[in-house]
Image (spheres, helix red, strand yellow):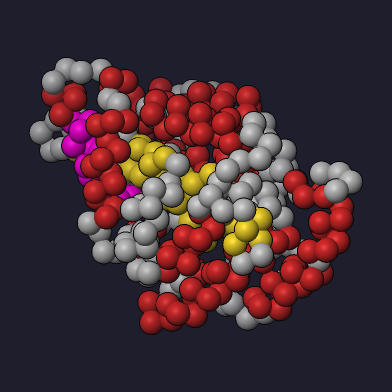
Amino acid sequence: MAAATRSCRPWGSLPGLLALVSAAAATWDLTSLRCNFGSFCECDFRPDLPGLECDLARHLAGQHLAKALVLKSLKSFVQDPAPKKPLVLSLHGWTGTGKSYVSSLLAQYLFQGGLRSPHVHHFSPIIHFPHPTHIERYKKDLKNWVQGNLTACGRSLFLFDEMDKLPPGLMEVLQPFLGASWVVYGTNYRKAIFIFISNTGGEQINQVALEAWRSRREREEIGLQELEPIVSRAVLDNPHHGFWRSGIVEEHLLDAMVPFLPLQRHHVRHCVLNELTQLGLEPQDEVVQAVLDSTTFFPEEEQLFSSNGCKTVASRITLFL
């Protein structure tokens, strides 16, 4: 992609990265000048928190903790004209529980261009960091990429998917960007947002939710104080997680570890109805029931939680229409 477009998106095969970063850095003086006379430095950052809150309330099923944590963190961060550090959130939970959905909503409601915004950067280990033997090159390129994009626009969003599949040691290059200093490598980065997504901690979260159900506790009674320590421990004990020995957790650079609870049958039903609405279709009881009947639930005895959450709902619906 031509550097002249200033479209700073993650690389595919990495060629041309350093030229792109150099071009972004070369525009720093002009950017600084324009920031003094307007909101150019905010780029296409147009936060719509009421819209986000409404969408989460309507469409994110069964996640009282995630909704509350994400909204509270964002409101505090966005309303602060001079935040002391970037907003750093780590989303944890079983597959299909809404982690990727929430991250896409953040892009949609924070940036005018949504996921297509040149200031929203989505990293996938399979696409961007496929070869563990290239770790040193990835470290250098990732640091330069983040630095270059923050130089071009301090209001940037960085999404790191599947953290439990990243090469160990890669994330340590991000540590200087996540703390409370004004400048790192000549870049003011305090208005940036970093979102990390992984399944790590999902089994531990599921166990807490299962024990609560067996004890006849309401799902909404499960609190962050029960989940945060076990999720943190699961991350620190997992040598395959991107935070392994990075110092990011130990140095308390995460503003929140956001737990996503496993989804029960009525939550999956909610997802099916939502998907039918998105397709412009009226609710069809036979379709809803067919999707639920084709969904696998666990544990074997209780058949309580969906094995894939809502992840396969859309594809299953097409089978029964």
284 displayed left or right of 234: right
Q: Residue 123 appears at what percent x and percent y?
A: 52, 61
For the point 24% across and 31% down, which residue is it? 226
Does residue 207 lie above or below 156 as drawn?
Answer: above
Q: Residue 148 appears at what percent x and percent y?
A: 67, 66
Please identify the quarter of the rendering in which residue 4 is found: bottom right
Which quadrant is home to the N terminus?
bottom right
Q: Which residues are magenta?
A: 199-210
The one nearer the camera, 24 or 13, is 24
Asked if residue 200 is among those painted magenta in the image, a careful observer would answer: yes
122 displayed left or right of 5: left
Secondary structure mostly seen in the magenta stretch: helix
Q: Is residue 237 visible?
A: yes
For the point 42% across and 69% down, which residue is it? 170
Asked if residue 59 is among those painted magenta in the image, a careful observer would answer: no
The one nearer the camera, 310 or 282, is 310
